[in-house]
Every structure is written in structure tokens, then in C-alpha cells.
Image (spheres, grey):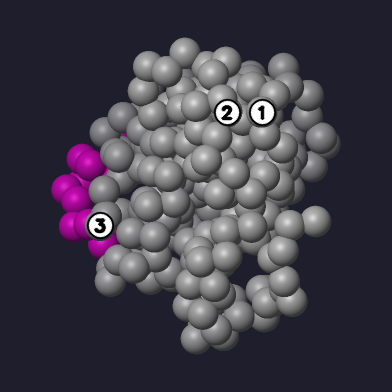
């Protein structure tokens, strides 16, 4: 799934850029003081500079070194404007650059930090919260592949039944280092986000649950997500019911 997330510009990066501009344009919605608005205006300028570099890197097919440089630029912008409304978005873009540069684990940690900073009242909270959990699923898959015990399309029941051997090559010090626990937590979190009444677009979470369950042959989860998406016109056309999930 990692490749799918990185190539899915229509779902992730383009939407984020548009919504970040909406955050910039809607700063007065928070009713901030003149001082705070001035502080946010400076943050807007810093963010716009780094966003331009980010966009150019995407268009030019930047190297890993270039993405690490861009991640550092967003990190400095964040450090200089921690008190601004755009600070968590700067951190989220830093995480995106990290991911594109191959620093998967730190990218996941950084994006989680951005989501935690946002809180549910932030306009981009649910978008980035979903993205964070999708990345966590990808990271769990990557750890499985690195352990040599599971492939990208492993059956979810096989993972449950062979949890000990699948994680045998990994030092178990917490959920982040246990692909099974990491995966389960991410799926549970995506379900919670999809069912949260404050989420303006639950289809995004349901779609990624459907996609993940299809790849991993988790029939129950796939059918649940598929049923939910049928009532959402913007998402129903993106999914289809496969005739069978019988193992090949």
C-alpha cells in the first residue's frame, strides 16, 4: 500500500494544498487579535515559500536527498512559527517530505505529532488523521516484508495465526515495533474516524479501509467498508465488489 499512498496525489497532496490555502484564508474565523493575525501572516509567507519548493520537487521527481532538504525546510519553518495556525500543516508537510525521502518511521511519528497538535476543531484534522493511520498500516506492512515473513498481499487471518513468527525478527518494545499490533490499532483508529459524527467526509476513511481489506483479503472488514461507501455518491464509484476473496 505504501506505493499506492505515495502515488495517490489526487487523494492526498493536491487536496492538502487547497485546504491549507483555505486555512490561510480563514484565519479570521478564529477571531484572533491583530497581533496573532500578524504572526499568522508571517507564517503564511514562510509556508508559501516551502510549499513552492515542495511542489517543484514533486514536478521534477526529486531525489531522496532533495526531499530530506525540503523536510528540513518545513522543520525550520515550523520552529519559527510554532504559535501560528499553520504550524501543524507545516509539520504535516515535513512528514510528507520525509516519507518521500524514505524516512518512513520518522514520517509516521511526525505526522502523528501534527495531528495531535491540530485537535478535532482544526479544519484539516480528519483529513490528516486518516492519512496518519493509512501510513501506520503501510509501515506495518513494510515491517512484515522486512521480517521476511509476509508479503504485500498476505491474508489477514494468516497474520493473526502466525503473529509470533511474523514478528520474530523484530525487537518487541511496543506497538510501533509489532506489525500485528500496529496494524490492529490503525484499523481500529480508521473505523473510529469513519464513524465520528464530526467527520465531514467519512468516505475517505471507509475507502482506505476497503482498499486495505481487499489487498489483505479481510472479508468482514471489506464488506463493512463497501456497504458504507454505497451510500456515498462521491466514493461509491471508486469501489467494486470482487466476485470472491478465495485465496489464490
Query: What segment carries the magenta color?
Result: 27-39
Q: Is 113 located above or below residue 243 in the figure?
A: above
Quadrant in which residue 210 is drawn:
bottom right
- Specify the quadrant that holds the C terminus: bottom right
- Which secondary structure, mark 2? helix
In magenta stretch: residue 18: no
How far, Cα to Cα, is label 3 from label 2? 39 Å
For label 3, the residue is 121
In this figure, which residue is indicated by the disc labeled 1? 149
Mark 3 burial class by Cα count in 10 Å: few <14, some 14-19, many 20+: few
Q: Secondary structure at mark 3?
A: loop
Q: Position of residue 223 (x, y in %)?
A: 54, 73
Give the camera-side residue of 54 and 95: 95
Dot 2 crowding, Cα within 10 Å, few <14, some 14–19, many 20+: many
Q: Nearer the viewer, mark 3 or mark 2?
A: 2
Q: CA distance from mark 3 to mark 1?
A: 41 Å
Q: Position of residue 137 (x, y in %)?
A: 53, 42
Of 135 and 201, which appears nearest the observer?
A: 135
Residue located at (28% from left, 71% from top): 197
Front residue of 173/72: it is 173
Residue sitting at 72 percent across and 63 percent down? 246
Distance Cα–Cα, label 1 vs label 2: 5 Å
Sequence-earlier tag: 3 or 2: 3
Residue identifier under label 2: 166
Instruction: Determine which of the numbered discs, if any, sits on residue 81 in the image.
Output: none
Amino acid at each position: 500500500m505504501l506505493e499506492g499512498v505515495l502515488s495517490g496525489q489526487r487523494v492526498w497532496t493536491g487536496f492538502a494544498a487547497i485546504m491549507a490555502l483555505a486555512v490561510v484564508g480563514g484565519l479570521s474565523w478564529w477571531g484572533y487579535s491583530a497581533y496573532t493575525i500578524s504572526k499568522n501572516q508571517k507564517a503564511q509567507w514562510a509556508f508559501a515559500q516551502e510549499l513552492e519548493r515542495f511542489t517543484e520537487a514533486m514536478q521534477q521527481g526529486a531525489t531522496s536527498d532533495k526531499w530530506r532538504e525540503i523536510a528540513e525546510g518545513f522543520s525550520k519553518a515550523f520552529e519559527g512559527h510554532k504559535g501560528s495556525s499553520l504550524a501543524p500543516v507545516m509539520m504535516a508537510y515535513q512528514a510528507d517530505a520525509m516519507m518521500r525521502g524514505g524516512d518512513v518511521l520518522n514520517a509516521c511519528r511526525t505526522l502523528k505529532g501534527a495531528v495531535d497538535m491540530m485537535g478535532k476543531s482544526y479544519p484539516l484534522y480528519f483529513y490528516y488523521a486518516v492519512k496518519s493511520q493509512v501510513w501506520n498500516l503501510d509501515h506495518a506492512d513494510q515491517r512484515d516484508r522486512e521480517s521476511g515473513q509476509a508479503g504485500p498481499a498476505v491474508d489477514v487471518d494468516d497474520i493473526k495465526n502466525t503473529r509470533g513468527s511474523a514478528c520474530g525478527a523484530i525487537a518487541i518494545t511496543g506497538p510501533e515495533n509489532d506489525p500485528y499490533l500496529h496494524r490492529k490499532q490503525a484499523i481500529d483508529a480508521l473505523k473510529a474516524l469513519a464513524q465520528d459524527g464530526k467527520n465531514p467526509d467519512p468516505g475517505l476513511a471507509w475507502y482506505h479501509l476497503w482498499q486495505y481489506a481487499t489487498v489483505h483479503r479481510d472479508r468482514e472488514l471489506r464488506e463493512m467498508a463497501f456497504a458504507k461507501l454505497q451510500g456515498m455518491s462521491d466514493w461509491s464509484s471508486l469501489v467494486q465488489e470482487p466476485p470472491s476473496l478465495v485465496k489464490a
